[in-house]
Image (cartoon, rainbow, N blue to C red):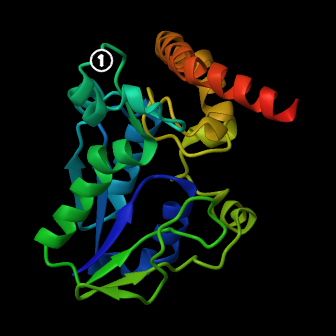
Amino acid sequence: MKILQFSGGKDSLAVLLLLKGQLSEITVMWANSGDNFPETLEQMEKIKAICPNFIEIKGKQPNIIEEFGYPVDVLPVRNYLPIMNLVQAERPLMQGMLECCFKSFLTPMHNKSIELDATVIIRGQKNADKQKSPVRSGDIIDGIEYWFPIQDWTDEQVMDYIKDSDLLSSHYKEANTSMDCMHCTAYLEDNQWKLPYLEKHYPEAGKEVKRRLRLIKHEISQDMQYLDALIGETNG
């Protein structure tokens, strides 16, 4: 079975459009994190309409955050659950950004692909991506071949290819980044696009994300004060 692991972002959409004539032979799989933008849900209804074989995986991002803490780019170890269990500290829980993604939807999607006996997994991964797996197109791992049809494309090539598609999420008109979880507090570089969009269109969610970000900043700054002092002494 060939499975296209579809996120709804620009890269996975480019792959979907490239393979549009082969969709009868491909299962399109989307992991619903449980914290999606309405725009993503609207987009998925359009995607389902053109995909003969579509599977939605139910993720549990809000539950994952409640259990393991806010996803962050910089993780203070004293806020990390395995450490807090050892020292019984009373600090807000936090987890690494990739941990949250894997627990919330990437691992459930991969496990479902294995359960369905996938022989080929297709993704929109590119060499130009800042964050990508070490897997490359054509690699075979545990009997599964990985295909990345746009591996050598640039971001500009992707946007040029999909810009006129009615399947492109409407948020791209204002925010030049994918929109996964509404309440994500990680991927700060992308949040320069996402947070203003969130505050404009979903002010209550934007207010909550800002509250979480302030809390995260406070926790990180406690360690940074000591680091700044040490660097200052060294430089002096």
Could you say where residue 61 lies in the image, as x and y percent from the top left? 29, 35
Image quarter of the N terminus: bottom left
Corner quadrant of residue 41: top left
Q: Is residue 64 above or below residue 53?
A: above
Which residue, given by chain and number where applicable, does mark 1 sit on? 89
Left/right placement of residue 4 relative to residue 188 reads left
Viewer-nearest residue: 127 or 199: 127
Viewer-nearest residue: 97 or 88: 88
Corner quadrant of residue 52: bottom left
Q: Residue at x 17, y 72 (%)?
A: 114
Crowding near pointer 1: few (<14 within 10 Å), some, many (20+)? some
Corner quadrant of residue 161: bottom right
Tag 1, which secondary structure? Answer: loop
Is any atom of residue 200 visible in this view? yes
Left/right placement of residue 5 relative to residue 171 reads left
Viewer-nearest residue: 197 or 168: 197
Q: Residue at x 58, y 77 (%)?
A: 151
Query: How many badges with numbers are in the image?
Result: 1
Could you say where residue 157 lies in the image, as x and y percent from the top left? 72, 69
Is any atom of residue 61 visible in this view? no
Q: Residue at x 66, y 57 (%)?
A: 164
Left/right placement of residue 212 relative to residue 35 reads right
Residue placed furthest toward the right = 236
Image quarter of the C terminus: top right
Could you say where residue 181 lies in the image, as x and y percent from the top left? 42, 35
Left/right placement of residue 5 relative to residue 126 reads left
Q: Residue at x 50, y 68 (%)?
A: 124
Could you say where residue 27 lies in the image, as x and y percent from the top left? 26, 71
Please name the amino acid that badge 1 sits on.
Ala
